[in-house]
Image: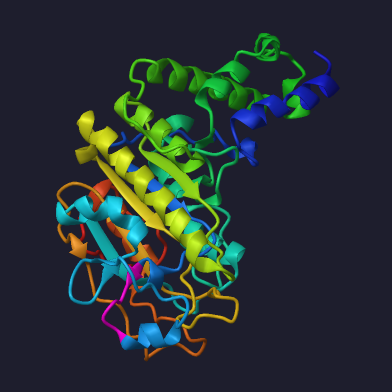
C-alpha cells in the first residue's frame, strides 16, 4: 500500500477512535479486572445557574438579588428552604424515593471563570493553577481499563476527561455508523498489510494496532447491543438520544464501566428564564426516561449517575435578564440505596459571598470523584486524584 494513501486514509481510524497520542495508546495493558458497577456522567455545559435550579424559595436575599430573574411560581418545594425549578418535576419521584442526592456548594479553591479552563479543571481534577494532559477518567482507564469500549463517550470527539496517559476511551454518537465505518474495505486492505516490513521505518505500527482495536471495539459494541434494544419512550432531543444509547449499552451488559454524556447551552448571560427552563426540562425528562429504562431491565441498582456543570452563576442578576459566570454550584447524584439522599448539605450563605459576588465553595469537586472511585467503582484513588480528598457519605 502506498504510504501517502495510508496516512490520508488513516483518518478513518481517528474518526473511530479518538486517540491524539495514539503512539502511547497500547503501551500498557491493565491486569486488574473491572468491577460490575457503572458510572454515567452528565455534563451540563456552559455553566448552569444552580440558584435557579435548586431554589432558596424562603430567602429574601435571593429575590432581592434577582428582581426579574428569580423563580416565583410553581416551585417544587422539597423542604422549608429549598425547591426544584418547575422544569425538574420529573425528578420529584427520584427525590421522594431516596434515589437523588443533591450536593450544594461544590467547587474548588481559587475558581476560574473561563468556560474552557474551568472545564479542563473539572475534567482533569487539577488545581486551578495546574495543567494536566490526562483526565481523571482517563487515568482510571490507565489503571483499570482493558479495552477502549470500557469507557464510551456519546459524542463525535473524546473529552479530556476520558483521555489517559496510556489508555483512552472511545467516542461515538452513533454506534451503528461506527460499525459501518469499521467495515469499510479500507480497513481490510490496511490490516492485510499489517506485517509490511516498512512499518517500523514509518513508525506506523501503533496506528495499525489502534485501527485493529477500533474495528474490534466497533464490532463488539454493535453485536452486543443488538440483543437488547430499548423499549422505553424517550423525549425527542439529542440528549435523550445519548441516554437511550447508554441504556441499550448498559442493558445489553456491555463491558463498559464509564459513559460520558453532555447537554449544552447553559451559558445564560441574557434572557435566561426561557432558555434554562427548556434545557432543564430536557434534562429532567430524559433522565427520568433513562432511569425508568434501567429499572425495567433491573440495571439501575448497579448504575450511578453524576451530573455537574463547570461552574455556577453570579448570585446577582445582570442587566440583560441573565447571570454571569460564578463559582460554586450544585451536583446531582442519582442511584439506588444512597447513604445520604435528598440534600447532602445546606446551601451556602447568600450574603457571605466571595469578592466577585459568588457562592463560596464548601466541598471540593475532587472529593466527589474520590468518593465515587473508592466507594462505587471500588478502586484506589492513587494516581487518579492527586490531591488528598475527604471521602463523602452519599454512597
Looking at the image, residue 76 sits to the left or right of residue 145; the answer is left
Q: Quadrant of the C terminus?
A: bottom left
Q: Nearer the viewer, residue 99 or 374?
A: 99
Q: Residue at x 24, y 64 (%)?
A: 392
Whether 126 is drawn above or below 168: the answer is: below
Looking at the image, residue 48 sits to the left or right of residue 60; the answer is right
Q: Quadrant of the N terminus?
A: top right
Q: Residue at x 63, y 36 (%)?
A: 22
Q: Residue furthest front?
A: 73
> Is 364 covered by the magenta stretch?
no
* Residue 369 seen in render: no
* Residue 370 seen in render: yes
Magenta residues span: 54-59
Q: Residue at x 46, y 55 (%)?
A: 278
Picture quadrant where residue 16 is located: top right
Q: Position of residue 32 (x, y in %)?
A: 33, 36
> Is 57 covered by the magenta stretch?
yes
Q: Position of residue 169 (x, y in %)?
A: 49, 38
Whether 34 is drawn above or below 3: the answer is: below
Q: Position of residue 261 (x, y in %)?
A: 46, 44
Looking at the image, residue 262 sits to the left or right of residue 2; the answer is left
Q: Nearer the viewer, residue 138 or 25?
A: 138
Q: Residue at x 59, y 39 (%)?
A: 24
Picture quadrant where residue 106 is located: bottom left
Principal secondary structure, stretch drawn in magenta: loop
Amino acid at each position: 500500500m502506498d504510504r501517502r494513501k495510508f496516512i490520508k486514509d488513516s483518518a478513518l481510524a481517528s474518526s473511530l477512535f479518538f486517540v491524539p497520542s495514539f503512539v502511547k495508546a497500547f503501551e500498557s495493558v491493565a491486569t486488574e479486572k473491572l468491577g460490575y458497577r457503572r458510572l454515567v456522567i452528565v455534563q451540563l455545559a456552559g455553566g448552569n445557574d444552580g440558584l435557579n435550579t435548586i431554589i432558596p424559595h424562603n430567602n429574601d436575599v435571593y429575590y432581592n438579588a434577582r428582581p426579574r430573574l428569580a423563580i416565583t411560581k410553581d416551585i417544587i418545594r422539597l423542604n422549608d428552604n429549598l425547591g426544584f425549578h418547575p422544569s425538574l418535576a420529573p425528578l420529584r419521584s427520584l427525590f421522594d424515593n431516596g434515589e437523588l442526592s443533591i450536593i450544594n456548594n461544590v467547587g474548588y479553591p481559587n475558581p476560574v471563570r473561563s468556560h474552557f479552563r474551568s472545564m479542563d479543571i473539572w475534567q482533569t481534577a487539577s488545581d486551578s493553577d495546574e495543567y494536566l494532559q490526562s483526565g481523571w477518567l482517563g487515568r482510571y482507564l490507565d489503571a483499570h481499563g482493558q479495552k477502549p469500549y470500557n469507557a464510551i463517550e456519546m459524542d463525535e470527539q473524546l473529552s479530556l476527561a476520558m483521555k489517559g496517559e496510556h489508555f483512552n476511551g472511545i467516542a461515538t454518537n452513533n454506534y451503528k455508523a461506527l460499525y459501518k465505518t469499521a467495515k469499510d474495505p479500507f480497513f481490510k486492505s490496511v490490516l492485510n498489510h499489517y506485517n509490511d516490513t516498512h512499518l517500523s521505518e514509518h513508525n506506523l505500527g501503533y496506528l495499525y494496532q489502534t485501527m485493529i482495536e477500533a474495528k474490534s471495539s466497533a464490532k463488539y459494541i454493535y453485536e452486543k447491543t443488538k440483543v437488547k434494544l430499548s423499549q422505553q419512550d424517550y423525549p425527542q432531543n439529542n440528549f435523550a438520544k445519548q441516554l437511550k444509547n447508554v441504556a441499550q449499552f448498559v442493558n445489553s451488559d456491555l463491558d463498559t464501566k464509564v459513559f460520558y454524556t453532555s447537554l449544552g447551552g447553559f451559558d445564560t448571560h441574557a434572557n435566561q428564564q426561557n432558555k434554562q427552563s427548556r434545557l432543564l426540562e430536557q434534562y429532567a425528562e430524559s433522565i427520568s426516561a433513562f432511569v425508568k429504562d434501567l429499572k425495567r431491565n433491573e440495571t439501575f441498582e448497579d448504575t450511578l449517575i453524576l451530573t455537574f456543570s463547570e461552574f455556577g452563576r453570579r448570585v446577582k442578576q445582570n442587566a440583560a435578564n441573565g447571570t454571569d459566570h460564578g463559582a460554586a454550584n450544585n451536583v446531582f447524584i442519582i442511584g439506588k440505596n444512597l447513604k445520604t439522599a435528598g440534600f447532602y448539605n445546606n446551601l451556602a450563605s447568600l450574603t457571605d459571598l466571595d469578592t466577585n459576588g459568588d457562592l463560596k465553595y464548601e466541598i471540593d469537586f475532587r472529593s466527589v470523584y474520590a468518593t465515587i472511585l473508592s466507594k462505587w467503582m471500588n478502586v484506589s484513588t492513587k494516581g487518579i486524584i492527586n490531591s488528598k480528598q475527604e471521602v463523602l457519605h452519599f454512597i
